[in-house]
Image: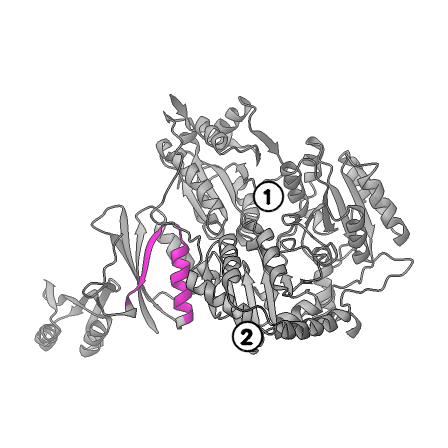
Amino acid sequence: MQLTGAEIVIRCLQEEKVEHVFGYPGGSVLFIYDEFFKQDQIKHILVRHEQAAVHAADAYSRSSDKIGVCLVTSGPGVTNAVTGIATAYMDSIPMVVITGQVPTAYIGQDAFQEADTVGITRPCVKHNFLVKDVKDLALTIKKAFYLAKTGRPGPVLVDIPKDITAEKCEFHYPKSISMRSYNPVVKGHTGQIKKAVQLLLDAKRPMIYTGGGVILSDAGDKLTKLARQLGFPITQTLMGLGAYPATDRQFLGMLGMHGTYEANMAMQHCDVLLAVGARFDDRVIGNPTHFGAVPRKIIHVDIDPSSISKRVRVDVPIVGNVPDVLDEILKQLEIAEGKPDGKHLAAWWKQIEEWRGINCLKYKMGKDIIMPQFVVEKLYEVTGGEAFVTSDVGQHQMFAAQYYKFDKPRRWINSGGLGTMGFGLPAAMGVRFANPKAQVACITGEASIQMNIQEMSTCKQFRLPVKIINLNNGYLGMVRQWQQMFHGNRYAESYVDALPDFVKLAEAYGHVGLKVEKPADVEPALKEAFGKHKNELVFLDFIINPEANVFPMVAAGKGLSEMILAEEL
Amino acid sequence: MRHIISILIENESGALSRVSGLFSARGYNIESLTVAPTEDASLSRMTIVSIGSDDIIEQITKQLNKLIDIVKVVDLSEAAHIERELMLVKVRATGKDRDEMKRVADIFRGRIIDVTESSYVIELTGNTAKLDAFLDAIDRSLILETVRTGVCGIGRGDRILKV
């Protein structure tokens, strides 16, 4: 049967078992929206800004095994979406972005709402396509889904000119697909894995360091099994939290710029490092020369060869899909001769416990003023550690990562690579659609939340009972912290004068708003939000200590073990 | 070090911009870039000359391999290979310079492919060093215009880049 391009788009999404599409209509996608109107299998979520559609689709992917899809119109629809696409790209999030384009004959003529979508998005997508013939449409969408979720995942964009959505052709959706130019490696090299296993068994001061790759490939269980079997200390990046239970004794906390003292010290002083699905980013290892000055053997498991030996030379590179490689390591460990050296390991743990003993995350809490760390700790208690937590970017993000102990993967949703303010609220929407019964909290600040605050309207329309935890210090907190520490206390443009009354604002959108100013009121307010107002969006405006800082801290360009601790200031 | 990177890439619109965009976005250097379809019209062959440390060249080949449209990448400079570049030079050829120009072109096995009363166009092929040497051998003030294709290269013997 002959179908129009617009009908084909819908049929393809149905074939891919897509349940939700986040989007915003406009001229170039009207035929596609017309087809949405005629069906009820796929639910369309109307956002209030295209950036939010992309963040929501992104978090939909991050928090589930489903794939986020968004749909925006040409020109400004696309340019508004770019921040969201770049956010997903930096964190390797699988996502399919469908964009309308002006009719084929108008391309290049500076038509109304025309933008060079493929050109603009090229550096921030895994791949993109411009469909020039309706006969290519189904195959292109199939390729988009295949590319997005295989190999190192990422966003894939399909740009469809309006005339293509109106033209007709026979519909055939391919069952499977192969591309001669794209063959991601799955299995790791056996010889390399053997070498890795030997290094692990011979280690005196071993360390495991894992990142977002473990979450993305759902390898948390295998990682946990391996770490427990070896008895090695383990740390995780901001993107990797939840892959190994944070409440376990072997977990040293997050590492990096705002990592724990014990994690950073162990990372710096280990003699064998097993890095899994992580990329030795500047926020993670600090200065690479300082990091490289200590001799240690590095085993690096990653699906992307270009992540290996990019910032740090490694000794045993293993390219492969993380769960497959971990399986093979576990198998090789069983047949390998020898066990980890118990005596050395015990001495190493003794050293680590000394580092842990300084209790680097302690903070002073008075009776009168709320500390942000306290709010996150109380949130953890009130939600029983079971909430999905999204965040924006800044101090609150670091406090959330440090003080909310994630025991399960895909529960901590934040923009790690790009560091996108405005991510948190739309992300919380995506999480809730992917996990309709889950408790969802968005930890944010008064600056970040205002970058996509219009989405409170979307939350009302779709009855999304997100709890917004606004850590309100009146400052762009992280900017202010750097200005205090590195720019002579000159708070240039980091004070946010004229804040709205968030309680009234929440009420204006039809939600519940609560202002909390006393430490004693923190827990009752959270209980009220998650109890009495369980089914409503609650905006909790916590007025916190305006000068609270995030510690420990590795200053930009410094070595990982050169941390500034809270009491040193 | 100077490397010659050969690429087989799907012959699709925008493929070139994916490659050039990668180089500019990551701050890699391009000395020259040539591209044209192969005997299989669905594939283009691209030759890029780049200068960088071993680490950088390793990253370049890895990053290129990551581009979805790229089918194969080979660093030709890793083993025996041949490289050629074509140059057209328009020179002033009057008086005593006319004979001298012809003589130097002959020495470099160049061909004069256009002649007017006052100028020649000389066609020259060879590796980059040879073309540079020719320009150094003639009187620079006589050069009116030069155009070069950039390097294309191929492996020697059994080294074959094919799908």
Residue A51's label in the rendered image is 1
- At a point 69% along the width and 52% down the height, the residue shown is A407
Look at the numbered disc 2 and give the secondary structure of its residue: loop
Quickly name the residue at label 2: A296
Look at the numbered disc 1 and give the secondary structure of its residue: helix
Residue A311 in sight here: no
Quadrant into which the C terminus of chain A falls:
bottom right
Drawn side of residue A436 relative to residue B52, left or right? right
Residue A258 in sight here: yes
Crowdedness of circle 1 by 10 Å Cα count: few (<14), some, many (20+)?
many
Drawn side of residue B98 relative to residue A519, left or right? left
**Viewer-side residue, A11 vs B14:** A11
Q: Which residues are magenta?
A: B55-76
- Tag nearer the camera, 2 or 1: 2
Chain under disc 1: A
Drawn side of residue B47 relative to residue B18, left or right? left
Measured as percent of width and height from the top left, residue B98 is found at: 10, 73
Measured as percent of width and height from the top left, residue A562 is found at: 67, 75
